[in-house]
Image: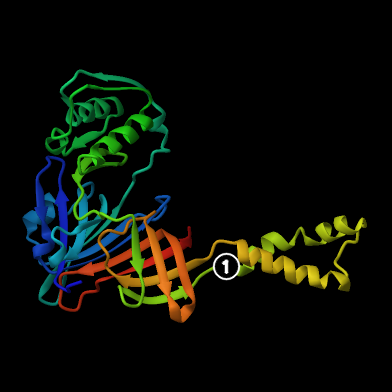
Amino acid sequence: MAWGRIVRLEARNKDSVQVDVASLRMDARCVRSRVFDDNELEATIHNASPDTVNRFLQRGTNIALYAGYEDEGTPGLMYQGNIIDSKTYRSGTDTLTVIRSMALRSLTRPFTATPVCLSFLPGSNAGDILDSIGAILGLVPIGKEMAREAVFPSGWTYVGQVSGALKRLGQDLRAKGMGLYVDLAELVVFKYSGDSTYSVAYLSPDSGLLSLQDSTNYINAARSNLSSLPSKTAAEKGKEPPTMTKEDVDDVYSYLDGIFTSMKKTYSVRCIVIPKLRPNSLVHLADPGSGVDGLFVVNRMEVAVGTGPDSSFAMDLDLVEA
């Protein structure tokens, strides 16, 4: 893998006007997780013009972070969200703008329980559906010009909760190389870039793995399982002692061994930026030095990238055994 790094930070305002601010010196760090409880970004941008700050780097602006490598073509989407906070201040000879963003997407929010009956004629496109759902929910559709590329020759129909309609529309868009981002204010269609053509990413010391640490919580596993051991051994012997006796010691060792053998292991991993990785991505983790070789799922990821010569360009992953 070449080390020609690409970083893009794109901001798009409510009028769907878009600007790429990565031509400026910029450092960004984002966090994403499988259950959306950690989906945030903080970026520091050097010497953005007042016009850029006022038009794009303000609360509510939709923002997307891309990262990758020159020899892999278009970089991959690392993060998508909306600016929550923006501050600009002087530091020496530079003007720094710090933005903080959150991804508010969730299909469990109350408004998604709204019942809908949607029916579109043959030849309709995803932009038509986006307009209709946006009108029902009071959300602003962004990216309709891209969504119109997804045409449905046989029409499009859905009856049920709007969460199901959003999920199905997202699946239909993905088949066309696009994604649907839903938050409390907007319905945003974006194009996927650099998506993986393989189903499993491979991580080893020879393929991007920088560090590995066992993060399995053995104490919690023992605490949650051993509480039932006294009654378990008593039931097997037909008695009811309040605590275990010396003759139960062998049972303790075998019981613990069973707990730790069957429980899902977790690892904290640092690796180079792999644009194709997402929360829920499947990873084959192999580190002979640590005796680890198996399949894991990305539970949480933190990405640090930037355009400066000393900027970070790495990912910290929380992996759980598949």
Q: Can you give x and y, in whole percent of width and height, for residue 163 in the image?
A: 37, 32
Residue 240 is left or right of residue 114, and the answer is right
Q: Residue at x 46, y 75 (%)?
A: 213
Q: Can you give x and y, in whole percent of width and height, for residue 174 in the image?
A: 25, 41
Q: Amino acid at mark 1?
A: Asn
Q: Which colour style is shown? A: rainbow
The correct choice, above or below, for 238 with respect to 311 in the image is above
Can you say which quadrant of the picture contains the N terminus? Answer: bottom left
The correct choice, above or below, for 35 with respect to 96 in the image is above
Question: Which quarter of the figure has residue 271?
Answer: bottom left
Q: Can you give x and y, in whole percent of width and height, for residue 194 in the image?
A: 20, 55
- Mark 1 element type: loop
Residue 165 is left or right of residue 48, and the answer is right
Question: Which quarter of the figure has residue 6?
Answer: bottom left
- Does residue 214 appear in the picture of this structure? yes
Q: Residue at x 73, y 63 (%)?
A: 226
Residue farthest to the bottom, as pictured: 289
Q: Nearer the viewer, residue 94 or 195?
A: 195
Residue, disc 1: 217
- Number of marks: 1
Question: Which quarter of the figure has residue 161?
Answer: top left
Q: Residue at x 44, y 78 (%)?
A: 288
Q: Nearer the viewer, residue 118 or 293?
A: 293
Q: Can you give x and y, in whole percent of width and height, for residue 33 in the image?
A: 39, 55
- Does residue 220 appear in the picture of this structure? no
The correct choice, above or below, for 87 with respect to 140 in the image is below
Q: Residue at x 20, y 62 (%)?
A: 67
